[in-house]
Image (tube, coloured by chain):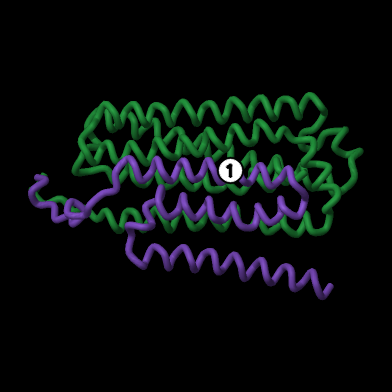
Chain colours: A green, B purple
Amino acid sequence: MSGHVHRDDLGSRLGMWLFLVTEMVLFGGLFIGYSYMRYRYPAEFHHGGMELNATLGVINTLVLLTSSLTVVLSIVAVQRAEKQRAMALLSTTLVLGLTFLVIKGFEWSAKFHHGLYPNSAHLATLPPGEQVFFGLYFTMTGLHGVHVIAGLSVLGVMLWWVATDRIRQDRYIHLENSGLYWHLVDVIWIFLLPLFYLAA
Amino acid sequence: MNETLHSHEAHIEHPGYGTFIGVWLLLLLLTGCLVGLSHVSQSYAVWGLLTLTPLKAGLVFYYFMHLKYEGPLFKIVILVTLGTLLIFFALLFSDVAFR
């Protein structure tokens, strides 16, 4: 390999942001759909929100906010060549992300036990507005959950790369970009909390 | 091989742990306010949703996602995106209003 290494961290981050922008439009479309449906069915959305467990929603918010903090702190640790601390912080993020998914799993299974799941017989007996509410709830929290799984997979690789010195003080753009993705997942949840769990 | 890299990043002063921990505490506080407002009344909850939620998202974008430390290009890309979504939102509700 020749001595010259082509590297463009700014371009790399810009590319990541352009991808994140498409994610913002994806979720933005769903948020616009939500706002119209809530405008059309205010009482049904209020009633639907009462069915959701606000405590679990708030706990999951605290879990995701903290996981975002540990990612951004792991970048600081890498910048300061504090490898052990960076690995500990990234591991904390992974544990918090998994905690989020476990809580989400309990929450969804409770809904399933009450006969609330997409295309269920019980859901079909509810008024149209509530069917729309739960349709949006499962679509948006489900799509968000898929993003959490994707983010955790990527951050798992980042932890491996920090451990093997592929990410280090002079080269951490992959960790930065993975962090950007994770923070966007956090931002989407920041909006989902008041739209669904605090809607009642 | 790293000697040939001419990354200007090395010369930038990176923010420390304290900045981000402070932002995190603020985010927790704002979440508490949001939950508190949702218990007061429906209109307080909506106002909380419309003001505190974008503020929280803004803090994550600005600090955690390092937008504070990026050049104008990144900010323009994001503002154009948010502007586009706002136009779609306005178009939808103008359609609803004149239905």
Q: Nearer the viewer, residue A3 or B84?
A: B84
Measuring from the top left, give residue A192's x and y in whole percent. 63, 45
Residue at (52, 36) in percent of width and height: A64
Residue at mark 1: chain = B
Residue at (68, 43) in percent of width and height: A139
Q: Does residue A19 appear left or right of residue A109 in this picture?
A: left
* Residue A62 versus residue B89 in the image, above or below: above
* Residue B34 versus residue A29 in the image, above or below: above
Q: Which residue is mark 1?
A: B31
Residue at (37, 52) in percent of width and height: B66
Measuring from the top left, give residue B58's x and y in whole percent. 49, 55
Measuring from the top left, give residue A48's x and y in whole percent. 80, 41
Residue at (37, 31) in percent of width and height: A90
Q: Amino acid at mark 1?
A: Thr
The quarter of the displayed image where residue A84 is located:
top left
The quarter of the displayed image where residue A157 is located:
top left
Q: Nearer the viewer, residue B43 or A1?
A: B43
Q: Quadrant of the N terminus of chain A?
A: top left
Is residue B60 visible in this depiction of the protein? yes
Q: Residue furthest bottom?
A: B98
The quarter of the displayed image where residue A138 is located:
top right
Task: Give the class, few, some or many, for how many residues have Cα within 10 Å of label 1's Cα (few <14, many ≥20).
Answer: many
Q: Secondary structure at mark 1?
A: helix
Q: Quadrant of the C terminus of chain A?
A: top right
